[in-house]
Amino acid sequence: MSAATLSLSIPIAALTASGLPGDGRLFATAVMNGCPFHLEAVPVVDSEGLQKGADPISEARLEALALEHNASGFETLSIADRNYALFLIPFGL
């Protein structure tokens, strides 16, 4: 049995910059079936065939997520001419 695929659209206007100097990440909160999620968009650049964070904070976050998920790279989406890896992380209130 294969898992169903959900297609969700995220309004770009819902994403907010972190506000920290040198941190290009964008954030929002999403709620699916009553469960809240942190939505985190990490800016990435391609460097020698590898994804790297676009700034030191994003690079540290991307490395941690790659290690946590045993991934060598992530799909990206383009927002305002910049590529971002997008993550949904559940949390409790």
Image (cartoon, rainbow, N blue to C red):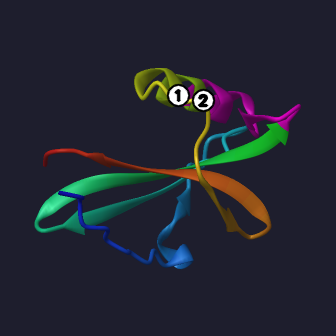
Secondary structure beneath label 2: loop
Secondary structure beneath label 1: helix
Q: From the viewer's perspective, is residue 85 above or below residue 23?
A: below
Q: Is residue 49 magenta?
A: yes
Return the mark for residue 66.
1
Mark 2 belongs to which amino acid?
Answer: Ser
Q: Nearer the viewer, mark 1 or mark 2?
A: 2
Q: From the viewer's perspective, is residue 43 above or below residue 50?
A: below
Q: From the viewer's perspective, is residue 13 above or below residue 37?
A: below
Q: Is residue 77 magenta?
A: no
Give the left or right position of residue 20, taking residue 86 as reference.
right
Q: Position of residue 69 (x, y in %)?
A: 42, 29
Q: Which residues are magenta?
A: 47-61
Residue 48 figure quarter:
top right
Return the mark for residue 72.
2
Q: Position of residue 44 (x, y in %)?
A: 71, 44
- How far is mark 1 from mark 2, CA to CA? 6 Å
* Of 85 and 49, the residue lying toward us: 49
Few, some or many C-alpha atoms within 10 Å of disc 2 (few <14, some 14-19, many ≥20)? few
Residue at 47% x, 73% y is: 14
Q: Position of residue 1 (x, y in %)?
A: 17, 57
Mark 1 in CB contact with mark 2 (< 8 angstroms): yes
Sequence-wise first label, 1 or 2: 1
Mark 1 belongs to which amino acid?
Answer: Ala
* Of 72 and 56, the residue lying toward us: 72
Return the mark for residue 30.
none
Q: From the viewer's perspective, is residue 7 above or below residue 71?
A: below
* Of 7 and 41, the residue lying toward us: 7
Residue at 11% x, 65% y is: 34
